[in-house]
Image (cartoon, rainbow, N blue to C red):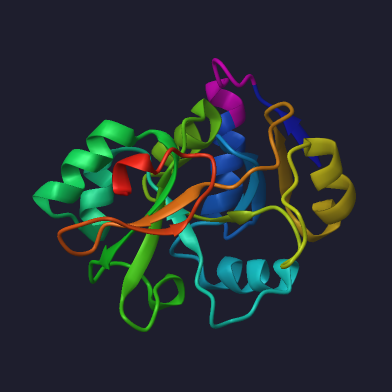
Amino acid sequence: MLLEINPDNPQPRLVAKVVEILKNGGVVAYPTDTTYGIGCSIFSKKGIERIYQVKQRDRKKPFSFICSDISEISRYARVSNYAFKQLRRLLPGPYTFVLEANSVVPDLVTTKQRTVGIRMPDNNICLAIVKELGHPIVTTSANLSGEDPIGNPWQVEHELGKLLDLVVDGGDLSADVSSVVSLIGDSPEILRKGVGDVSWCE
């Protein structure tokens, strides 16, 4: 099912519909500032398991998650003074930042080293969803593992809609990926070059 939401001014009643699905353990596709993502509540074990099945993804590869603001990031990860300055400067934006997880983060979304990837996309719809939900959502690109990301909501619906509870239509997006940067330690480490400028890391 496609649900069209205004990307500039997301309608609260439509955002509430998405959040109700997430609160019940559902899995939805939604727009980010790069491509479409698939997500569920970070606390829904059933939802996370479903996403692994939808993606046909290796269980050893944990998912990142989306926070609605920097203070929320600080509740779920250890943020050094240096990391905090970078987060304030670059977010919201097309980055995934790797940080050490706090104890509240479920093991299903952390590495064995208890690190996590955290996003805060520059997209009004997904930030409104996370804010209304009250805690982060899992995020991974809307595609089968190994295939290209999908930037068109109708294509997401066509290819994955039967496996999801809802596809949020936020318009056409790129099929790009975020830059991944580790902020563990005293200097940044580039793990993947994507849309976000990483010249400040070099």
Residue lying farthest to the front in this orientation: 202
Front position in the image: 29 or 132: 29
Q: What residue is shown at x 22% (from left), y 54% (from top)?
A: 75
80 and 140: which is toward the camera: 80
Which residue sits at x=54%, y=47%? 194
Residue 86: x, y in percent? 24, 41
Question: With 198 as the anchor, is 28 left or right in this view?
Answer: right
For the image, the number of numbered tags is: 0
List x then y, in percent, for residue 139: 54, 55
Above-or-below relation of 60 to 55: below
Looking at the image, is 174 positioned above or below residue 166?
above
12 within the magenta span? yes
In which quadrant of the rendered view does residue 9 lie? top right
Q: Is the magenta stretch mostly helix, strand or loop?
A: loop
Front residue of this view, candidates 177 and 3 = 177
Q: Which of the 4 quarters of the picture holds residue 167?
A: top right
Residue 53 shown left or right of residue 116 in the figure: right
Quarter of the image that includes the N terminus: top right
| Residue 87 percent location from the top left of the image | 26, 41
Residue 31 painted magenta: no
Residue 106 picture quarter = bottom left
Which residue range is magenta in the image? 6-14
Residue 101, how many percent across, how many down? 27, 67
